[in-house]
Image (spheres, rainbow, N blue to C red):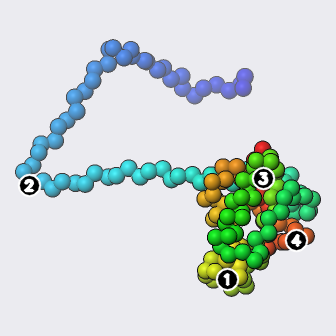
Amino acid sequence: MATVKPLVAARVVIQPAAVREAKPKPVAPKLANAKKVPQAKAIPAPIKPPVQNTLDSTWDRRIHKGAIVPDISVDLHETNLSGAYARLDNALEQAIHQKLRVVLLVTGKPREHDRAGGPSGQGGRGAIAAVVRDWLASSRHASSISAVRNAHPRHGGAGALYIVLKR
């Protein structure tokens, strides 16, 4: 830095605000036959969804290795959609009240048709697994959920989820 010299020494003159004069804005003449141009509407900023991915890499490594031990397990087998939602809501309420950290949610594996990108959530086998993430995102407990991850194969694999709650 000691050997670097500026190419041109620029001199900046700053005038006080009181000395500056405001220039009048030109006014456009109004025409009798002029059409009104619609004003451009301001585009609202997109609403940010609640942050659901607040886990660090340590959690992801533990989940991948199968080192996670769930504090509570909720099995939604043999329930219909409304019964499953009520059971999930009650289980999350109890887990939050007891200050538990990891909930294992067993939903059952989705149908092969659902995995291939077909219609889902239409009742029958795999309907709960198809909508459970939407339920969690829109539930009254969404602000208490830190992350939702697929379970390790020994806890159910594609048919189960870990719900990690905030402390």
User: Does residue 149 lie above or below 127 as drawn?
Assistant: above
Alpha carbons under labels 2 and 4: distance apart: 74 Å
> CB atoms at circles 1 and 2 under 8 Å apart?
no
Residue at 60%, 26% (x, y): give it. Answer: 6
Residue that carries the numbered disc 2 in the rendered image: 33
- Mark found first going from the N terminus, 3 or 4: 3
The residue identified by callout 3 is: 95
Percent from the top left, x then y, of residue 143?
66, 49
Circle 4 residues within 10 Å: few <14, some 14–19, many ≥20: few
Q: Which residue is mark 4?
A: 153
Q: Nearer the viewer, residue 109 or 90?
A: 90
Dot 1 or dot 4: first in sequence order is 1
Distance, label 1 to label 4, CA atoms, is 23 Å
How far from the left and from the top, in percent, is residue 100? 82, 50
Q: Residue at x 91, y 63 (%)?
A: 66
Q: Tag 3: Cα neighbours inside 10 Å, few (<14), some, or many (≥20)?
A: some
The kind of secondary structure element at disc 2 is: loop
The answer to whether residue 100 of the structure is visible from this angle is: yes
> Is 123 or 110 nearer to us in this picture?
123
Q: Name the quadrant of the N terminus.
A: top right
Q: Amino acid at mark 3?
A: Ala
Q: What's the amino acid at mark 2?
A: Asn
Quarter of the C terminus within the rendering: top right
Earlier-in-chain disc, 1 versus 3: 3
Which residue position is annotated with label 1? Answer: 124
- Label 1 sits on what residue type? Gly
The CA span between labels 2 and 3 is 70 Å
Q: Secondary structure at mark 1?
A: loop
Residue 109 lies, in percent from the top left, at 77, 77
Q: Dividing the picture into quarters, in which one does residue 134 lie?
A: bottom right
Q: Are marks 1 and 3 in contact (CB under 8 Å)?
A: no
